Image (cartoon, rainbow, N blue to C red):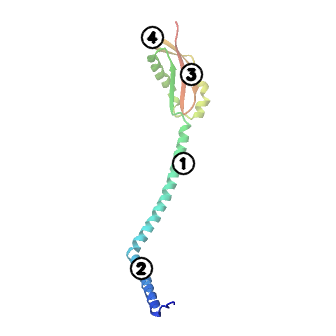
């Protein structure tokens, strides 16, 4: 046979359930009362930091664009002049490299378009050029001229026969 529970045990179960729910609600209220302000402050701080993060990401993007523009502008001018020589000796090569670089220094900072348009003048300036070093006369002939952000001049140096 099956036993039927009495009404008082069902009442007791409801009472324990009600006490449990009441305790849970009371504990949640106490928790919110004690820590709610701190949690709200942290939420506000998180929102502020997210806003700053967006601002910084935009600023980084703008700075990267500005940097890319500056690099593009820097690429369009002659920044360096490289003179590469084949000379009879190293001492002559160093001295001629210094002199030729000094002659071409006016091209530094000029736009590449202007230098490229003036390439015939540069070729005339450097073709069959005579330099006197230590009692000897050297003839410099232009082999290659590369117009880029670093202007490269390749020259062949020979001792003039008298």
Q: In the rendered structure, which disc, 4 or 1, sits on the residue that comes first in sequence?
A: 1
Query: Disc 2 vs disc 1: which is toward the camera?
Result: 2
Image spot of residue 109 (x, y percent): 52, 34
Give me the disc on residue 135: 4
| C-alpha span from label 1 to label 3 | 40 Å
Q: Under tag 4, what secondary structure?
A: loop
Q: In the rendered structure, which disc, 4 or 3, sits on the residue that comes first in sequence?
A: 3
Asked whether the beta carbons under mark 4 and mark 1 sit within 8 Å of each other, the answer is: no
Characterize the local packing of mark 2: few (<14), some (14-19) or many (20 or more) Cα atoms within 10 angstroms: few
Give me the disc on residue 90: none
Asked whether the beta carbons under mark 2 and mark 1 sit within 8 Å of each other, the answer is: no
Q: In the image, is residue 6 above or below residue 87?
A: below
| C-alpha span from label 4 to label 2 | 102 Å
Query: Disc 4 vs disc 1: which is toward the camera?
Result: 1
Image spot of residue 54 (x, y percent): 50, 59
| C-alpha span from label 4 to label 1 | 55 Å
Give me the disc on residue 29: 2
| C-alpha span from label 2 to label 3 | 90 Å
Say which residue label 1 marks. Answer: 65
Characterize the local packing of mark 3: few (<14), some (14-19) or many (20 or more) Cα atoms within 10 angstroms: few
Q: In the rendered structure, which disc, 2 or 3, sits on the residue that comes first in sequence?
A: 2
Say which residue label 3 marks. Answer: 125
Characterize the local packing of mark 1: few (<14), some (14-19) or many (20 or more) Cα atoms within 10 angstroms: few
| C-alpha span from label 2 to label 1 | 52 Å
Locate residue 55 relative to residue 30 in the image: left or right.
right
Q: Between 18 and 122, which is closer to the camera in this rendering?
A: 18
- The residue shown at (45%, 20%) is 94
């Amino acid at each position: 046979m099956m036993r039927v529970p009495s009404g008082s045990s069902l009442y007791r179960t409801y009472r324990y359930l009600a006490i449990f729910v009441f305790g849970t609600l009371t504990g949640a209220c106490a928790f919110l009362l004690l820590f709610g302000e701190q949690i709200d402050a942290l939420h506000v701080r998180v929102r502020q930091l997210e806003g700053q993060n967006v601002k910084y990401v935009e600023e980084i993007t703008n700075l990267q664009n500005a940097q890319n523009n500056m690099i593009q502008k820097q690429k369009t001018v002659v920044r360096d002049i490289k003179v590469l020589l084949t000379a009879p000796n190293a001492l002559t090569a160093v001295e001629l490299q210094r002199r030729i670089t000094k002659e071409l220094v006016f091209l530094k900072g000029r736009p590449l378009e202007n230098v490229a348009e003036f390439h015939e003048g540069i070729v005339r300036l450097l073709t069959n050029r005579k330099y006197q070093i230590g009692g000897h006369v050297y003839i410099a002939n232009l082999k290659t001229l590369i117009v880029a952000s670093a202007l490269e001049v390749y020259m062949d140096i020979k001792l003039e026969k008298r």
